[in-house]
């Protein structure tokens, strides 16, 4: 019986101890009219058969071992050092629950504390939580924090259109029951246009860094304007880009959120990923989700524990600001191991490889007949290409050559029909980039 | 590093080991011409650790050894369903066809993944008797949120937007009332009766009084968070429906229901599944979870998206084409992309292993194990509610005549006997609650050893209470100073960056 | 009867605040019973001086390691002063709930709410019954 270890003799002994003759007698409180329905499921399978079926299903997908991937748009194909997977496969980590019993959970607690610390180092914030579900939900939770920080007196949220379209959808889904206005992202507004929308009813303004188009906006004066209006500045940042570019903390952000998948988490068809959430000390008690803090045990030994617990749903119930309970603990561990391995120098090197390769690709594509690359702003590892024909046609041709091409921006941005968002990472060798350019050139 | 003990630490912090210039990776040379970095936009300092590969491995392996986990032993944490996480599922998740599949791959290039999601949607619907399922919620709490948002929108679309009250029993998980608030609705708590069921008089009063037109629905866990099947569940459902409300089932305890009853057939309108409880996907030390949501015909158009449907039927030799679809009146997207796919594939493999004849056994043996523990522990502890339990049961962590010993002390002492403690102080309605859920994957010898440990602890409480009050004695650390943690708030050990002014 | 203090010169609410009236200024804190139930208080947060509140509104929050409680006023008015010393030393609420642990002062625009409060004897009985 698969993962059920009972022998018939044991089952009989246990039933005798309980004082019933059959297991089914234990279900008498379930409504008889509906008890023990038939289940129309496929028949059972052995482990050997399941392994073969999973392999067959997985091979019906176009994946990174057979294809060169030049698609990003919020999910990035990066190199993951072997160590990460080996640590994640430690049963002591992945088969443990949330560390509610700190005496026997110091491994998870310290690793998470170190994750929080390294996220602070990357973002320039004072504190980070143990994670949210993904970048999009982190942003949605940041909106709640900003509303709370204004004690719900401010009811306007300004989002840039250059935030990932799905993130903005999630923010709207999360806050559909609230009496607030979410504005700023319907047009093509530049940051200066967004700053004009600030007023004394604005709780926050959110920007993406690099933005959805891969560009690094100059944010030097943004925080001042946002703070002058009494609002919070929320920056959605790709942590990989923070290996090279100024930290959002240095730029004056109050909350930094984003998708941590770039750091040690595989593409995995979109999840589980890692929503990170970092904040200034001043607002730390408004964070939702678990936070690990340092303390001492009864002998004075340093140890770690979940702290600020009364914010959470299990204690505060209907007065909690979020219902989050399970987070993405194991993905935070992956990021922790990844950041520790890469370290100060390695992460910078990876960032530079991304930067140089993306710029090499962008320059070559820009020289192709019929194509042009938006070079108006600095960019990291993604850039927008105006194409001479529909993106779908180009991608079909690329696919035949074993290449997964850029992301079609047309469906999300009316003004970007026939534009693709191309992503180049350290995993793309020069030969792959050259092949991409060659195939695209042939379609010019 | 031998002898490194800053303030007597178990394991130094990653920031306290390493040396300047060291790195744990070996990266390829840059094979393209270098571009110029815009100096005015780049950062000066990246204060990450500088540690070698071997050091990193040892650091995290040592940390792992400070944890307790299912792979080490019984983990009877009530309401969390800490069952064995099959190893084959971990292998499957790491297949390149899954791990290296971009979420925005053209659908024609993701037919394997879409097929799998489509099958899983169907199986979950079948197991619980629901018309349609969305796999997009990232955890149980997100499933709850999606469910309540659907109920809200359903009433608005019928011109009954004034329905803003969700009834929640006082034994509910905290996520239930917190969810209602997030959705901008109002919670009304219902008391339990002496049997642990919802107090029917209070329910009727709420549904038939002045608030009748404001009742949007009710959230309830089945079996209840006390591990009991509500004998009145059909009447509860009917009462709320009669008032015009919809019924939400919290599926946290689905491990007691598979093949026993289908919530959809009982009359529930919507429920969430915890793939990380019932369907064996690992808890990961706090996540990831996965919280699919199932609905009946009424709420189908409101499901969070995207969901997978057949977008072109099978035609001769051409297999059906699967694609993502946003339901007609969808409440929207709960997260980016399409749910925690890595959990979907594990749940798929899990259901595939048990199949039609086996999935009911999961529940049967989970309930057998719980009742066996309950029967044996009743001799040394007070067990409220004299009825057979579902997959879990609550006992009072209080030893008669030894007032200074609390449930917490019993829990901490269990660690010394090599067990993870049960859930403490939940549900809130039982004093000194210890909520025990062994799951079906536990072998009788280990259940017996747990009983023995609990019996010895009850004896120790009478003869040497100090041993309990100071427990654990053998864990990596002793009890922690939580007041200090909350007051001092040391949340980060990274060197500070130049601050913004 | 339990082991807590209940000064006779104050008035008490069911949500465990005490109220003292001096002219039109009402001083509010939490009771000895409440601080004992909460255990070690680690954090307090109050609305800002100058804020106006209605009767029944929350004027702040108090947190221990295991619980969080909203604080309510039974009188409407303007918050004139908050006890900022508690921000750094919240444990003062545990040590001296009726003295140095006071929380806010409100210039009440209507004192009628005070009539609904309990006196010390009634509050003691109320606590005993819980």
Image (cartoon, coloured by chain):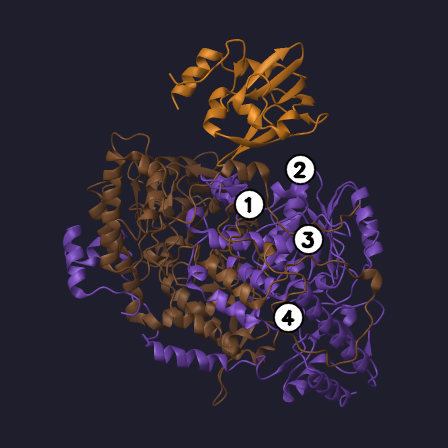
Chain colours: A purple, B brown, C orange
Mark 4 secondary-structure assignment:
loop
Label 1: how many residues lie within 10 Å, few (<14), some (14-19) or many (20+)? many
The residue that mark 3 highlights is: A256
Whether marks 4 and 2 lie on the same chain: yes
To which chain does the residue with label 4 belong? Answer: A
Is B407 situated above or below A225? above
The residue wearing badge 1 is A293
Instruction: Point out residue B326 in the picture as x, y percentages from the top left corner.
Output: 58, 66
Q: Residue under mark 3: which chain is it in?
A: A
Residue at the image position 71 percent from the left and 41 percent from the top: A154
Front disc: 4 or 2: 4
Q: Name the residue carrying label 2.
A: A151
Q: CA distance from mark 3 to mark 2?
A: 20 Å
Q: Does residue B199 appear in the picture of this structure? A: no
Q: Earlier in the sequence, mark 4 or mark 3?
A: 4
Residue A76 is labelled as 4
Q: Left of B476 or right of it: where is A385?
A: right
Mark 4 or mark 2, earlier in chain: 4
Disc 3 crowd rating (10 Å Cα; few below 14, some 14-19, many 20+) is many
Kindly indicate whether the residue at mark 2 contacts the one at mark 1 (C-beta within 8 angstroms). no
Nearer mark to the viewer, of 1 and 3: 1
Mark 1 falls within which chain?
Answer: A
Q: Is residue A116 left or right of residue B292?
A: right
Residue C68: % across, % down:
52, 34
């Amino acid at each position: 019986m698969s993962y059920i270890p009972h022998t018939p003799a044991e089952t009989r002994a246990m039933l005798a101890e309980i004082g019933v003759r059959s297991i089914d007698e234990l279900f008498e409180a379930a409504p008889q009219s509906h008890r023990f329905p038939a289940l129309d499921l496929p028949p059972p399978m052995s482990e050997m058969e399941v392994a073969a079926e999973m392999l067959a299903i997985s091979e019906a997908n176009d994946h990174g071992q057979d294809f060169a991937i030049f698609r990003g748009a919020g999910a990035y194909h990066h190199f993951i050092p072997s160590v990460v997977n080996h640590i994640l496969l430690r049963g002591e980590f992945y088969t443990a629950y949330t560390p509610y019993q700190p005496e026997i959970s110091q491994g998870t607690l310290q690793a998470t504390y170190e994750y929080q610390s390294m996220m602070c180092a990357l973002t320039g914030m004072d504190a980070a939580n143990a994670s949210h579900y993904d970048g999009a939900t982190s942003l949605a939770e940041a909106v709640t924090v900003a509303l709370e920080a204004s004690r719900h007196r401010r009811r306007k949220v300004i989002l840039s259109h250059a935030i990932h379209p799905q993130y903005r959808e999630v923010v709207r889904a999360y806050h559909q029951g609230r009496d607030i206005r979410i504005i700023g992202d319907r047009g093509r507004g530049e940051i200066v246009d967004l700053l004009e929308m600030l007023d004394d009813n604005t709780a926050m303004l959110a920007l993406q860094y690099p933005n959805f188009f891969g560009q690094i906006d100059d944010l030097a004066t943004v925080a001042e304007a946002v703070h002058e209006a009494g609002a919070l500045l929320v920056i959605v940042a790709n942590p990989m880009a923070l290996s090279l570019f100024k930290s959002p903390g240095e730029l004056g952000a109050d909350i930094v959120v984003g998708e941590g998948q770039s750091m040690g988490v595989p593409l995995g068809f979109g999840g589980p990923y890692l929503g990170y959430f970092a904040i200034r000390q001043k607002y730390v008690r408004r964070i939702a989700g678990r936070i690990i803090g340092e303390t001492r045990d009864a002998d004075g030994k340093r140890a770690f524990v979940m702290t600020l617990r009364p914010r959470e749903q299990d204690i505060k119930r209907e007065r909690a600001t979020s219902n989050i309970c399970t987070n993405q603990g194991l993905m935070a561990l992956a990021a922790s191991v990844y950041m520790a391995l890469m370290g100060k120098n390695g992460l910078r090197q990876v960032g530079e490889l991304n930067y140089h390769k993306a710029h090499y690709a962008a320059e070559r594509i820009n020289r192709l007949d019929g194509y042009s690359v938006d070079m108006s702003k600095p960019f990291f590892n993604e850039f927008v290409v105006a194409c001479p024909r529909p993106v779908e046609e180009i991608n079909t041709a690329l696919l035949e050559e074993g290449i997964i091409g850029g992301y079609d921006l047309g469906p999300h941005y009316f003004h970007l029909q026939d534009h693709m968002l191309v992503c180049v990472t350290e995993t793309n060798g020069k030969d792959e980039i050259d092949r991409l350019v060659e195939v695209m050139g042939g379609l010019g | 590093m031998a002898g490194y003990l800053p303030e007597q630490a178990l394991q130094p912090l990653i920031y306290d080991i390493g040396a300047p210039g060291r790195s744990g990776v070996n990266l390829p040379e840059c094979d393209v011409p270098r571009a110029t970095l815009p100096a005015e936009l780049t950062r000066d300092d990246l204060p990450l650790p500088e540690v070698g590969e071997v050091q990193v491995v040892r650091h995290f392996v040592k940390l792992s050894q400070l944890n307790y986990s299912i792979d080490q032993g019984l983990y009877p944490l009530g309401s969390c369903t800490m069952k064995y996480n099959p190893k084959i599922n971990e292998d499957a998740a790491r297949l390149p066809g899954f791990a290296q599949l971009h979420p925005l791959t053209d659908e024609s290039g993701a037919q394997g993944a879409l097929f799998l999601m489509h099958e899983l949607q169907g199986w979950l619907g079948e197991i619980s008797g629901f018309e349609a399922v969305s796999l997009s919620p990232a955890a149980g709490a997100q499933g709850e949120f999606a469910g309540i948002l659907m109920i809200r929108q359903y009433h608005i679309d019928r011109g009954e937007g004034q329905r803003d009250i969700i009834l929640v029993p006082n034994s509910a998980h905290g996520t239930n009332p917190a969810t209602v608030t997030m959705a901008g609705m109002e919670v009304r708590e219902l008391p339990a009766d002496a049997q642990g069921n919802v107090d029917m008089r209070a329910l009727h009063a709420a549904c038939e009084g002045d608030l009748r037109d404001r009742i949007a629905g009710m959230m309830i866990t089945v079996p209840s968070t006390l591990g009991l099947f509500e004998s009145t569940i059909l009447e509860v459902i009917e009462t709320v429906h009669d008032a015009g409300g919809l019924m939400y089932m919290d599926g946290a305890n689905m491990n007691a229901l598979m093949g026993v009853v289908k919530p959809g057939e009982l009359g529930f309108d919507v429920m969430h599944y915890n793939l990380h409880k019932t369907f064996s996907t690992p808890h990961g030390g706090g996540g990831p979870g996965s919280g699919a949501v199932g609905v009946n015909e009424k709420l189908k158009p409101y499901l969070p998206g995207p969901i997978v449907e057949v977008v072109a039927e099978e035609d001769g030799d051409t297999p059906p084409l699967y694609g993502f679809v946003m339901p007609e009146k969808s409440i929207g997207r709960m997260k980016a992309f399409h749910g925690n796919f890595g959990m979907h594939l594990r749940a798929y493999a899990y259901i595939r292993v048990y199949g039609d004849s086996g999935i009911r056994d999961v529940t049967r043996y989970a309930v057998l194990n719980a009742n066996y523990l309950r029967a044996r522990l009743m001799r040394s502890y007070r067990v409220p509610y004299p009825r057979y339990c579902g997959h879990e049961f609550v006992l009072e962590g209080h030893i008669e005549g030894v007032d200074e010993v609390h449930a917490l002390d019993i829990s901490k002492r269990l660690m010394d006997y090599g067990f993870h403690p049960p859930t403490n102080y939940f549900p809130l309605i039982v004093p000194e609650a210890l909520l025990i859920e062994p799951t079906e994957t536990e072998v009788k010898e280990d259940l017996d050893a747990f009983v023995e440990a609990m019996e010895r602890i009850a004896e120790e409480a009478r003869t040497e209470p100090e041993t309990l009050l100071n427990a654990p004695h053998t864990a990596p650390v002793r009890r922690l100073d939580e007041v200090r943690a909350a007051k001092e708030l040391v949340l980060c050990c990274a060197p500070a960056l130049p601050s913004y002014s | 009867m339990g082991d807590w203090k209940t000064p006779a010169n104050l008035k008490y609410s069911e949500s465990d605040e005490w109220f003292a009236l001096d002219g039109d200024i009402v001083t509010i804190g939490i009771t000895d019973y409440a601080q004992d139930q909460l255990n070690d208080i680690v954090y307090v947060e109050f609305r800002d001086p100058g804020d106006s509140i209605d009767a029944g509104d929350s004027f702040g929050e108090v947190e221990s390691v295991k619980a969080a409680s909203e604080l309510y006023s039974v009188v409407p008015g303007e918050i004139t002063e908050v006890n900022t010393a508690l921000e750094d030393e919240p444990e003062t609420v545990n040590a001296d709930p009726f003295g140095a642990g006071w929380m806010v002062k409100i210039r009440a625009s209507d004192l009628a709410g005070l009539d609904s409060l309990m006196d010390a004897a009634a509050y003691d009985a109320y606590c005993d019954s819980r």
